[in-house]
Amino acid sequence: MRLRFKATHVVLAMLCVMYFITYVDRVNIGTAAGEIQKELGLSNTELGLVFSAFAYPYLLFQVIGGWVGDRFGPRQTLFWCGMIWAAATIMTGFVHGLAALFVARFALGFGEGATFPTATRAMQYWTPANRRGFAQGLTHSFARLGNAITPPVVALLILWLTWRGAFVVLGVVSLIWGIAWVWYFRNEPRDHGSITAAELATLPPRPQGERPKVPWGPLLQRMWPVTLTYFCYGWCLWLYLNWLPLFFKNNYSLDLKNSALFASGVFFAGVVGDSIGGVISDRILERTGNVRLARLSVTVVGFAGALLSLMPILFVHDITVVALCLSAGFFCAELVIGPMWSIPMDIAAKYSGTAAGIMNTGSAFAAIVSPLVAGFVIDATGNWYLPFLMSMGLLLVGGFSAFLMHPERPFEETGELVASGKVVAAE
């Protein structure tokens, strides 16, 4: 008997792979940072500049990338994004100085800038409305799985092929994904040869007629609390992704292999947090019909839990205890991913790609500032704990700013808001 997979499940699986690969390409620089730093003679401040390089175009492309995804569709947008980030990853393996390394990572930002907003657009029409939190949580859990697997895999590739060969291998994998995506995916689910009528019946309808123009002013006004909240989350995320392997390597004098294993253990906690957060948010929505409760409850608990989990490292410096605290903190922080990435679809379904891009500018801006501040603080004080302690303040701000978000009020071009907290048909 021939096994047949649903087209909607295959598309979701391909998006999971994309999230996995993009975060592998982002985290590999952190794992290889020690070898790169030694060969190129970089300070921690210069390394922070390299970490932040991809975030400058990434920040720019959050809003523009969301618009591009809305304008040209996820099929072509994600294909060309994949080609660019693959080329940038391969290019990183051939750099011989700070400037070239900065340019290569800068190019990576051009490739990855539009990926998540465009993926949100793809999920908008390939996922039932009541499964959005699950889909966002699942795809982002694959991103964290990429985080978790990258340190030991890249460490082995470095031992086998040097850090330069590791970047080339990972870039080739990205090329393969891009080709597979453009071959299989279709912007319109009904145009896919393998989709069934039963699957189509579960999907939200596509709006007919001319594409609406984005009402930038009102949309930005609605989304700024979401962006601020996501900035606070992003500050902590990029601190973990960029500096964690070096934190274990330098603060506890571990070799490449052992520091990679400790970092991997912390990142695995994020995989679980991503999946659980989205599932819990959807369950609350199904049982109560209250969008605000479903999104904010998980988000606030995640920020509070992350803050409380990091507090013990103020007093205890045993490597096992610190690793457990960092793991718990990353788990709690990742709980917010599913509900947060569902909020742009809850608020502005017609402009979900653009709205998701506006939200993700918060994380992109954090990706610029967080590595630079961390590198400078480490060079100035020699204290590898301070950057993680500074993130506790951002977690507190994020927990409070979450209450300013209103996912229960669908955005309308007229600027009028639907004040009901119940589920409202998006389109």
Image (spheres, grey):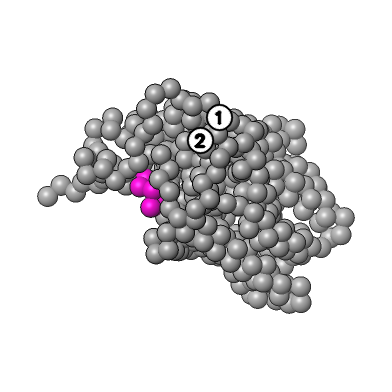
The single residue placed furthest to the top in the displayed view is 210
SS at badge 1: loop
User: How many numbered marks does the figure carry?
Assistant: 2
First in sequence: mark 2 vs mark 1: 1
- Please report the residue visible at 49 percent of the width from the left and 47 percent of the height from the top: 346
- Residue range highlighted in magenta: 127-132
- Please report the residue visible at 26 percent of the width from the left and 43 percent of the height from the top: 201
Q: Is residue 364 left or right of residue 181?
A: right
Q: Return the residue nearer the eye: 309 or 355.
A: 355
Does residue 118 appear in this view? no
Q: What's the CA distance linking mark 2 and mark 1?
A: 7 Å
Where residue 333 sits, quadrant-wise, is: bottom right
Q: What's under tag 2, amino acid-wise? A: Tyr
The residue labelled by disc 2 is: 351
Query: Dot 1 surroundings within 10 Å: few (below 14), some, or many (20 or more)?
Result: some
> Is 188 situated above or below 380?
above
- Please report the residue visible at 47 percent of the width from the left and 40 percent of the height from the top: 349
Residue 16 x %, y %: 43, 47
The residue labelled by disc 1 is: 214
